[in-house]
Image: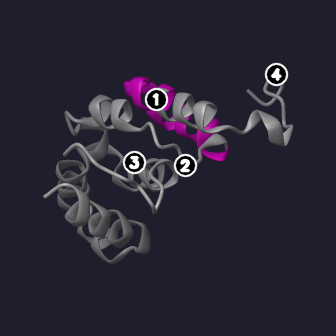
């Protein structure tokens, strides 16, 4: 990744952020390595519903709660216009896997967004 991905600011777009988050999510058994590779290439995108769909079985969130929280936090903007219902269950899985994350600022921010936009 470091040897071929351009480091130019114009390469950092919402589309590339979305694709890197999705690649990490589909890596399953290689998630730790994918997250380490893509973590610095994540950012906000308004099109994150497929990411939530990829993560909706909760397996990665249960196995890697802090990393999935970081992916979600990086991907979902504060001014999100809508959520389709996939965030709340993921946050519940993250909370069950690591209750200490309940007080983490990223968890609190996403939980507020979920409560505001998923009800």
Check contact, mark 1 vs mark 4: CB within 8 A: no
Check contact, mark 3 vs mark 4: CB within 8 A: no
Estimate the spatial distance between the alpha carbons at disc 3 and disc 4, rounded to whole Å: 25 Å
Check contact, mark 2 vs mark 4: CB within 8 A: no
Question: Mark 1 or mark 4, which has the lower sequence index?
Answer: 4
Question: Mark 3 or mark 2, which has the lower sequence index?
Answer: 2
Out of 95 and 17, give the one closest to the viewer: 17
Q: Residues within 10 Å of mark 1 (few under 14, many from 20)?
A: some
Of marks 2 and 4, the one in the foreground: 2
Q: Residues within 10 Å of mark 3 (few under 14, many from 20)?
A: many
Q: Residue at x 24, y 56 (%)?
A: 91
Q: Residues within 10 Å of mark 2 (few under 14, many from 20)?
A: many
Of marks 1 and 4, the one in the foreground: 1
The residue that disc 1 covers is 22
Residue 76, compared with residue 116, is above or below; it is: above
Question: Mark 2 or mark 4, which has the lower sequence index?
Answer: 4
The residue that disc 2 covers is 44
- The magenta stretch is 23-40
Of marks 3 and 2, the one in the foreground: 2
Check contact, mark 3 vs mark 2: CB within 8 A: no
Of marks 2 and 1, the one in the foreground: 2
Verify whether residue 6 appears in magenta.
no
Residue 107, compared with residue 117, is above or below; it is: below
Q: Residues within 10 Å of mark 4 (few under 14, many from 20)?
A: few
Question: Mark 3 or mark 1, which has the lower sequence index?
Answer: 1
Residue 68 image label = 3
Of marks 3 and 1, the one in the foreground: 1
Judged from the image, the secondary structure of the residue bearing numbered disc 1 is helix
Check contact, mark 3 vs mark 1: CB within 8 A: no
Q: Residue at x 37, y 26 (%)?
A: 28
The residue that disc 4 covers is 4
Out of 107 and 75, give the one closest to the viewer: 75
């Amino acid at each position: 990744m470091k040897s071929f991905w351009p480091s130019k600011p114009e390469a950092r777009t919402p589309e590339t952020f979305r694709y890197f988050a999705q690649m990490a999510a589909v890596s399953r058994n290689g998630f730790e390595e994918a997250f380490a590779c893509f973590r610095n290439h994540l950012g906000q995108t308004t099109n994150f519903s497929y990411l939530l769909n990829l993560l909706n079985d909760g397996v990665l969130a249960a196995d890697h709660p802090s990393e999935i929280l970081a992916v979600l936090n990086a991907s979902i903007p504060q001014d999100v216009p809508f959520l389709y219902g996939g965030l709340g269950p993921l946050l519940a899985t993250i909370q069950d896997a690591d209750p200490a994350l309940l007080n983490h600022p990223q968890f609190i921010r996403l939980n507020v967004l979920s409560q505001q936009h998923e009800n």
